[in-house]
């Protein structure tokens, strides 16, 4: 379980970007972090991922403060697929996939290749192995990035605005595909897209102005947001 307690963060010289955010992400389900642009979602994700150093509040992974975990262990257990996918354009999909098993897990090259091919086939994108990132669609690139992250067998995998570059039909197809992966890890989608969140997640949290305005079933949160009931006050 990931437990966030009273997490606050202020950028140098700026206002509070997060204000005592508390939320739990339980295993065995797909969760969502919801909110409009500027709500604090990205800052929250960067704190969870240890890319920003926060001084107020705690984030625990199965009871351990994430700031105390060794870097290699943390990166293996908590994965993030950012909105900008960072696939190396000069490497094939297969070569991109092999990087983490070789450099993070220390796998020999032939073993890493076998694992990468197996994961690509499992996720129904094996035919992309020899393609370069510039030769695949946005939806395919998203799937490759997720497949690459799953090779580390993370306990949790956060997806940052995974539908931002997808049209409505591709986003629907991606949602259906993602639901089929629920047994591979614990997913947390970070998104402004209420329809997408409703289609893949069960529980969630809604941020606005760096504060938690609602938590609970995603369908209820989305209904409140559409009705204008989730507005930052003060």
Image (cartoon, rainbow, N blue to C red):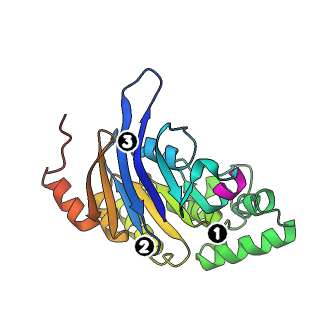
Quarter of the image containing the C terminus? top left
Query: Which is more N-terminal, label 3 or label 2?
Result: 2
Query: Which is more N-terminal, label 1 or label 2?
Result: 2
Crowdedness of circle 3 by 10 Å Cα count: few (<14), some, many (20+)? Answer: many
Q: CA gap, disc 2 to disc 3?
A: 23 Å
Magenta region, mostly helix, strand or loop?
Answer: helix
Q: Position of residue 78 (x, y in %)?
A: 58, 59
Q: What span is colored magenta in the figure?
A: 71-75
Instruction: Please give the residue where the numbered disc 2 appears in the rendered image.
Output: 29
Locate residue 26: give its quadrant. Answer: bottom left
Instruction: Please give the residue where the numbered disc 1 appears in the rendered image.
Output: 153
Q: CA gap, disc 1 to disc 3?
A: 28 Å
Q: Secondary structure at mark 2?
A: loop
Q: Is residue 97 left or right of residue 168?
A: right
Q: CA gap, disc 2 to disc 1?
A: 16 Å
Farthest residue to the top: give it: 13
Nearer to the camera, 61 or 213? 61
Instruction: Please give the residue where the numbered disc 3 appears in the rendered image.
Output: 40
Give the number of the disc on residue 136. none
Q: Residue at x 51, y 44 (%)?
A: 46
Q: Is residue 16 above or below residue 152?
A: above
Q: Is residue 32 left or right of residue 178?
A: left
């Amino acid at each position: 379980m990931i437990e966030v307690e009273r997490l606050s963060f202020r950028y140098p010289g700026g206002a509070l970007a997060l204000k005592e955010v508390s939320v739990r992400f339980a295993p065995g389900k797909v969760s969502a972090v919801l909110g409009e642009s500027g709500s604090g979602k990205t800052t929250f994700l960067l704190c969870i991922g240890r890319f920003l150093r926060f001084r107020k509040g705690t984030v625990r992974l199965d009871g351990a403060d994430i700031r105390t975990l060794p870097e290699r262990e943390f990166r293996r257990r908590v994965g993030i697929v950012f909105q900008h996918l960072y696939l190396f354009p000069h490497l094939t999909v297969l070569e991109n996939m092999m990087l983490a098993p070789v450099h993070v897990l220390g796998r020999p090259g032939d073993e890493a290749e076998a694992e990468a091919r197996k994961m690509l086939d499992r996720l129904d994108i094996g035919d992309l192995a020899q393609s370069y990132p510039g030769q695949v669609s946005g939806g395919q690139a998203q799937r490759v990035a997720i497949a690459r992250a799953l090779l580390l067998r993370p306990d949790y995998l956060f997806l940052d605005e995974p539908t931002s570059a997808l049209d409505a039909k591709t986003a629907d197809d991606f949602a259906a595909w993602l639901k089929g992966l629920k047994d591979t890890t614990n997913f947390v989608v970070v998104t402004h897209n209420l329809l997408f969140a409703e289609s893949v997640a069960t529980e969630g949290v809604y941020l606005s102005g760096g504060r938690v305005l609602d938590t609970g079933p995603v369908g209820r949160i989305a209904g409140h947001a559409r009705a204008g009931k989730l507005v930052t006050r003060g």
